[in-house]
Amino acid sequence: LTTASLRLSARSLLQAKQVPKRLGTISIVRNYSSSPAESAPNTKAYIDSGVIKHVQNVDVKKVLVIGSGGLAIGQAGEFDYSGSQALKALKEAGVASVLINPNIATIQTNHSLADEVYYLPVTPEYVSYVIEKEKPDGIFLSFGGQTALNLGVQMQRQGLFEKYGVKVLGTSVRTLEVSEDRDLFAKALEEINIPIAKSIAVGTVDEALDAAEKVGYPIIVRAA
């Protein structure tokens, strides 16, 4: 490639202007209606028709945020960042925040973000202790990675959220259970007629061999 090869003559430029070029495609999605008034958004109508579910306002003055704990493969800085943003949003909304996270080497454990920080293990026992002491109105499980999700399922099954009157904010524990459990997730997809690949959860090599015979080769084996 030389400088000379980059020079374009006036004739070639003129020809380029006459040849139409398709540079890309822009897709536009809109509501079609007979008049502009019909396409205007009507939130109340959507709610009344059931298209949009009405969300009940929850009086929340203090929230407990569950951190991700120690760093691990597949669970690191992204949860520290999301948790930090959650704490900032709570502060901007005027909601008091309490954080439990044993990892001091994180941004979210900075005392300028949360009103109270507890450097305790993320377990049902220690979280119950913090709930008893701080008495939060709600708890966030969505910003602590797999550690926080597993904790939420454990505490729900032990009846601790109901015992202390704490609301799980954001994704519900039932949704977490369905999305995390392979069998429940497969059944949920089948109920709404979404096709999925055949799968069987196993715990031993013998069970895996039996499952492979039922599903049929070739198969993919992966850790849950």
Image (cartoon, rainbow, N blue to C red):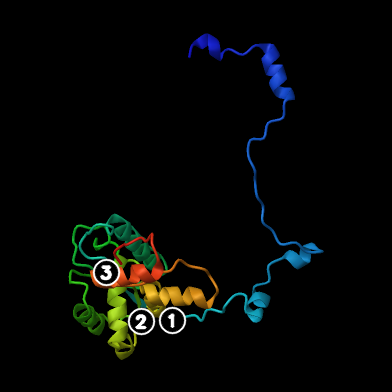
Point out residue 107 in the picture as x, y percentages from the top left corner: 26, 57
* Sequence-first disc among 2 and 3: 2
So how many labels did they put on this image?
A: 3
**Which residue is located at x 33 percent, y 63 percent?**
83
Q: How much space separates mark 2 and mark 3, taking CA atoms?
A: 21 Å
Gap between marks 1 and 3 measured at Cα: 27 Å
Classed neighbour count for the residue bearing mark 2: other residues with Cα under 10 Å, few (<14), some (14–19), many (≥20): many
Along the line of sight, the residue nearer the viewer: 93 or 8 = 8
Q: Which mark is residue 137?
A: 2
Mark 1 Cα-neighbour bin, 10 Å: few <14, some 14–19, many ≥20 = few
Q: Residue at x 68, y 12 (%)?
A: 10
Q: Nearer the viewer, mark 2 or mark 3?
A: 3
Considering every residue shown, the one lying at the far bottom of the view is 163
Q: Amino acid at mark 1?
A: Asp
SS for callout 2: loop
Query: Can the viewer see residue 170 in this picture?
Result: no
Q: In the picture, which quadrant includes the C terminus?
A: bottom left
Query: How far apart are the two marked residues, 1 and 2, measured between alpha carbons?
Result: 8 Å
Disc 3 element: helix
Q: Of circles 1 and 3, which is in front? A: 3
Residue 101 x, y percent position in the rendering = 22, 67
Q: Amino acid at mark 3?
A: Thr
Relative to the observer, which residue lies in front, 94 or 74? 74
Are the residues tagged 1 and 2 within 8 Å (C-beta)? yes
Quarter residue 213 falls in: bottom left
Mark 3 surroundings: few (<14), some (14-19) or many (≥20) residues within 10 A: some
Quarter residue 132 falls in: bottom left
* Residue position for label 1: 59
